Image (cartoon, helix red, strand yellow):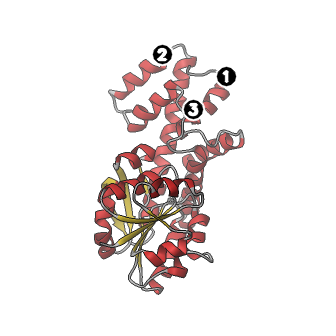
Amino acid sequence: MDMVGFIGLGIMGKPMARNLLKAGCSLVVHNRSRASVDELSKEGAQAAASSKEVAERSEIIITMLPDSPDVELVYAGEQGIFSGLKSGSLLIDMSSISPVVARKLAVEAEKRGCDMLDAPVSGGEAGAIGATLSIMIGGKASAVERAMPIFQALGKNIVHVGEAGAGQVTKAANQMVVGTTIAIVGEALVLAKKAGVDPAKVRQALLGGFAQSKILEAHGQKMLDRNFKPGFRIRLHEKDMKIALATGSEYGVSLMVTGVVGQMMTAMKGMGNGDLDHSGLVRLVEQMANTDLS
């Protein structure tokens, strides 16, 4: 069995790595802070001191990191994956980053005799814990086939979208739909409250009609419950909206609604609320309306 390396053990990465252990993978892990490494070591993972060491000890390497600069550093930095990479290894970046960066790294991997997949995910912390993530993949079909047992241990809806970068384009589209829907659900519920109508009953009514969505169901309830414990932080979603906007700029597509909601997220971050769950975006709507759902 191939040794699998896993770098990046945050809110998403740690439960994903744990699910690979449960599936019987031999795992070597590395993370910037040590606590998660120690935790997974007790559950059967091996620890590595650097990304380079992970690459030296693994045939398949998975990364789950916050942003494009983090991914570039972990792959191409001084103690990075590329410095310890063996020819024939498979690289799988499951972070949400720029499609341009994803394509550049895939070219660098190919020069070293390795395949690289961009395979960002949707489903948040709950999906990572429950192994029900939606996985959107860019890269060669042969590499996707090799990686399929890993993807099946992590998610349910697994789609090979196209060549390198296609997974990241898909993730940008996903984040646009999720972010703008959260914003409009927040506006709808706050409007109901300010107009003297029970927002919980408005949500219940909308769930039975054409406005029904997973966002209205799950995030609408979080708004009503005032439960903004992060499954996915506003500051990370803001980063994804910026990726979408930069991609739109790159390809000449105006993303006006995405831009407005991205600015709402920037405002929340500027007010010190960037670590709230993205359903917490409703708090900005509440402040502007001088009302709240509680």
What is the CA distance from the residue labelled 3 to the residue labelled 1? 12 Å
Q: Secondary structure at mark 2?
A: loop
How packed mark 1 is, by other alpha carbons closer than 10 Å (few <14, some 14-19, many 20 or more), is few
Q: Earlier in the sequence, mark 2 or mark 1?
A: 2
Task: Tell me residue 106's x, y (percent).
Answer: 47, 76
Task: Tell me residue 151's x, y (percent).
Answer: 33, 61
**Is residue 8 in view from this perspective?**
yes
The answer to whether residue 62 is above or below residue 16 is below
Task: Tell me residue 24's x, y (percent).
Answer: 30, 60
Relative side of 1 to 98, left or right: left
Name the quadrant containing residue 126. Answer: top left
What is the CA distance from the residue labelled 2 to the residue labelled 1? 17 Å
Q: Earlier in the sequence, mark 3 or mark 1?
A: 3
Residue in view at x 32 percent, y 68 percent: 147
What is the CA distance from the residue labelled 3 to the residue labelled 2? 16 Å
Instruction: Name the residue that disc number 3 marks.
Output: 282
Residue in view at x 50 percent, y 25 percent: 225
- For residue 290, which numbered disc appears in the image? 1
Instruction: Name the residue that disc number 2 marks.
Output: 198
Disc 3 residue type?
Answer: Val
Residue in view at x 57 percent, y 50 percent: 236
**Is residue 106 in view from this perspective?**
no
- For residue 270, which numbered disc appears in the image? none
Task: Tell me residue 70's x, y (percent).
Answer: 59, 64
Q: Secondary structure at mark 3?
A: helix
Residue in view at x 67 percent, y 22 percent: 290
The front one of 45 and 75 is 45
Disc 1 residue type?
Answer: Asn
